[in-house]
Amino acid sequence: MAGRGRPRSFDRETVLRQAMRMFWERGYEATSTADLTAAMGIKPPSLYAAFGSKEELFKEAVALYGKEEGAVTDRVLAEEGTTACQAIERVLRDNAAVYADPATPPGCMVVLAGTNCAPGNEGIQEFLADDRRHVVGALRERVERGVAEGDVAPGADAERLADFYSTVLFGLSVQSRDGASCDELMGVVDSAMAAWDGLTRAGARPPRAS
C-alpha cells in the first residue's frame, strides 16, 4: 500500500491571508513568488502543492478579500429599511473607512492589485475588471430597487448613476493609496452625495464632456 504524503506543516487559511496582504500591498505583478513564500513562511513546492500557481493563489486571495474587507458593498446594498441614497452613501463612507484603516494596506485590492499587467497577465486584469463590473451592477440594481420602492424618481438613469458612484468609489481607493486621510475621503463623499438630487431628478443625465 502506497504511503501517504507528508501532512502540511502550515495552516492554509493563515498563509492565504498573508498572501492576500502581500498582493494588496504590492499588486499582482510586483509580488514575486519569493516575496510570497517569505511572507507566507513556506517553500515554493508547498505553495504550488497547496494553491497550484501564483495566479490561482491570487484568485483565492481576492476571494478571501471579497468575503472580508470587500464584503462591505454587497452587505450594505442588501439591507432593508434604507433608501437608495442612504445605501449608496453608506457604501462610499464604509469603504472609505476601510481604505483609510491604518491596520490594513490603503485602498481596495480589487481596484489596485492589477492596474498594470504585462501581456501575459491580461487574464488577471480581466478577472479584476469582472469583479469591479459586479460592483457597478450591484449599484445599478440598488437604484432600480429605489425606483421600484418609490424613493428614486421614475425617470432616473440607473445606469448613469451606477457609473458615476462606482467611479467615485474606485477613485477613493486610488486617493487612499496616494495618501489621502479618512477625513479627506469623507469630504469627497460629501461632494458626491451633494450631487444626488440633481442626478436622480426625472430625466436628469450627468453631462458628457464635449
Image (cartoon, grey):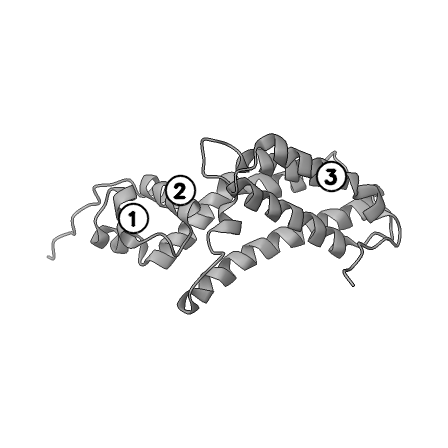
Foreground: disc 1 or disc 3: 3
Residue of label 2: 21
The Cα atoms of the two marked residues, 1 and 2, are separated by 11 Å
SS type, badge 1: helix
Q: Earlier in the sequence, mark 2 or mark 3?
A: 2
Question: What residue is drawn where x is 21% and y is 49%?
Answer: 43
Residue farthest toward the right in the current orientation of the protein: 202
Pick out the residue farthest to the bottom.
119
Q: Residues within 10 Å of mark 2 (few under 14, many from 20)?
A: some
Task: Indicate the position of residue 197 as horizontal and vertical percent values.
Answer: 84, 42
Q: Are marks 1 and 2 in contact (CB under 8 Å)?
A: no
In the visual, does 155 lie left or right of 124?
Answer: right
Rounded to the nearest angstrom, the CA distance separating label 2 from label 3 is 31 Å
Could you say which quadrant of the image residue 32 lies in? bottom left
Q: Earlier in the sequence, mark 1 or mark 2?
A: 2
Q: Secondary structure at mark 2?
A: helix
Q: Which residue is mark 1?
A: 35
Identify whether 130 is placed above or below 139.
Answer: below
Quadrant where the C terminus sits is bottom right
Depth check, front residue: 164 or 46: 164
Q: Is disc 3 placed on a helix, strand or loop? A: helix
Q: Looking at the picture, does residue 47 appear above or below residue 180?
A: below
Q: Quadrant of the N terminus?
A: bottom left
Q: Which residue position holds label 3?
A: 191
Q: Nearer the viewer, residue 108 or 55?
A: 108
Residue 207's place in the image compared with 7, above or below, is below
Q: Position of residue 143 (x, y in %)?
A: 75, 48
For label 1, the crowd category at 10 Å Cα-Cα, with few meaning under 14, some 14 to 19 and many 20 or more, is some
- Tell me if I can see residue 57 in this picture: yes
Residue 160 place in picture, x, y as percent = 75, 55
| Residue 86 percent location from the top left of the image | 74, 36
